[in-house]
Amino acid sequence: PSDPFISEPLPAVELRVSCKSLLDRDTLNKSDPCVMLMVQNQGQWTELDRTEVIKSNLNPVFAKVLMLDYYFEEVQKLRFEVYDIHGTHSIGTRDDDFLGGVECTLGQIVAQKKMVKPLLLKYGKYAGKSTITDLFSKSDPFLEIYRINDDGTEQLVHRTEVIKNNLNPVWEPFKVSLISLCSCDDERKLKCLVWDYDSRGKHDFIGEFYTNFKEMQKISLGNKVSSVRHSVIHWRLISVIVAIDFTASNGDPRNSCSLHYINPYQPNEYLKALIAVGEICQDYDSDKRFSALGFGARIPPNYEVSHDFAINFNPEDDECEEIQGVVEAYQNCLPKIQLYGPTNVAPIINRIAKLAAGKEPIKDASLYHILLILTDGVVTDMADTREAIVRASYQPMSIIIVGVGNADFTDMQILDGDDGVLRSPKGEPVLRDIVQFVPFRDFKTASPAALAKCVLAEVPKQVVEYFSHKAIPPINPVLNSNPNSIANTPE
């Protein structure tokens, strides 16, 4: 986004809601339930939308789709409240009108596709065996193909029919003459747009890609289309890896002037950046475990310099439980190491790129990696880092670099690629832009949410580019059959 403090939404999310075993509040008839969707803004809950009322039903499946904008880089807190509605269709204020509620984040629903949770009454008491199911709705896609003319203008060649409620669309065969399609030039560029149909004409943009007739004869167009849809919203599993700079330029951690100083009253800049980004990403990580690595320090037992070590000192399992586990490992690590140098990040980038390549199945990329590097200075191994990033740009991964402290980070902008295509020392360009660099000092007075917005803003685009390049179709959903659990297998 042009303004890092303003988020740009991805296509609107559609949620379908159902309930089971609701409490029966009415004396003569069964409850007449309605679900209210609340969103939290600046600490206040406000109603965004609500379902229709279903008469005399304790197991309602609501027809109305609840719609809201989706911001990947924000924690969007939601609350679903179920009420027994009386004659005027107004929400009652009496306690006996309230059938239960539940809180979650939109990120959890998007990542898990289907979420089943027990309804709670006031003070955290369970509403009997009542449950609510939030289902991340499917789309109604259609495809448009445009020919790019010699003067750069676009000419619509074909628009397909709409396929309802389908993430794996197979449109009816159609015929287009080569003259209309590409003026008999099989290398003429074609632009393909995928839309989510809206009856009001306000179709949601799903994604786009470019091809030509020559390429279309080699690869299924449908694979490209489905990869575009998948990569915009339908995240697979995300693995977050944190890499922390432990070079001597940070200062002695025992000194209050050190960037690694542990202040009992407020987190240092490393922790602020880690928590801001980690709290967003952990909703998309299936097991909420984060690999936590360090570089630039002398480590026990031999106190040799390492540019790739587990901060929990367990090389067999470098993962920590949730972001709080990373925070604890970081704080426990500091007294045991000697800050040294230099600031080499290529070894960790190469390690994660190798990990991403090794875990990628032939026909599917079920795991996308986000490497968060926190550093206080310009990298020493710039040439090796550029080479590592070029190699990594072919793998399912993104790299976020947060510059901590007041160093001159001018040279780090080269890695970002915003001012030009990053190239290896031999001149090879990156396949796609995978790096986002942000100096933390620009956000010292801003909220953690503002930092997260800027840091994560480019990740959805980077995921789109990877899946589009690989032409990877979505996976069919495999949902947990236990009604009291949350299904963790994404589509």
Image (tube, rainbow, N blue to C red):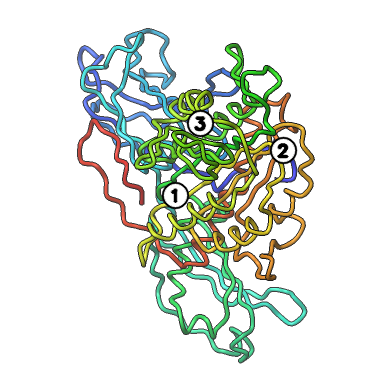
Residue 445 falls left or right of residue 292: right
Q: Amino acid at mark 1?
A: Trp
| Vertical placement of residue 384 versus 33, above or below | below
Instruction: Please tell me which residue is depicted at 68% across the width and 59% down the height of the picture.
Output: 383
Q: Position of residue 79 (x, y in %)?
A: 44, 25
| Vertical placement of residue 118 versus 414, above or below | above
**For this rendering, which residue is in front, 350 or 362?**
350
Measure how far apart labels 2 and 1 are at the Cα level. Answer: 27 Å
Residue at the spot of label 3: 279
Q: Quadrant of the N terminus?
A: top right
Instruction: Please tell me which residue is depicted at 68% across the width and 45% down the height of the picture.
Output: 437
Q: Amino acid at mark 2?
A: Pro
Q: Secondary structure at mark 1?
A: loop
Measure how far apart labels 1 and 3 are at the Cα level. Answer: 17 Å
Residue at the spot of label 1: 235
Badge 3: residue crowd in 10 Å (few <14, some 14–19, many ≥20) = some
Labels 1 and 3: the sequence-earlier one:
1
Instruction: Please tell me which residue is depicted at 59% across the width and 35% down the height of the picture.
Output: 246
Q: Position of residue 169 (x, y in %)?
A: 40, 64
Labels 3 and 2: the sequence-earlier one:
3
Residue at the spot of label 2: 439
Q: Residue furthest front?
A: 302
| Vertical placement of residue 140 versus 172, above or below | above
**For this rendering, which residue is in front, 159 or 299?**
299
Q: Position of residue 337 (x, y in %)?
A: 53, 30
**For this rendering, which residue is in front, 312 or 395?**
312
Of badges 1 and 3, the one in the foreground is 3
Residue 272 falls left or right of residue 36: right
Q: Amino acid at mark 3?
A: Glu
Residue 404 falls left or right of residue 293: right
Instruction: Please tell me which residue is depicted at 44% across the width and 49% down the height of the picture.
Output: 235
Measure how far apart labels 3 and 2 are at the Cα level. Answer: 19 Å
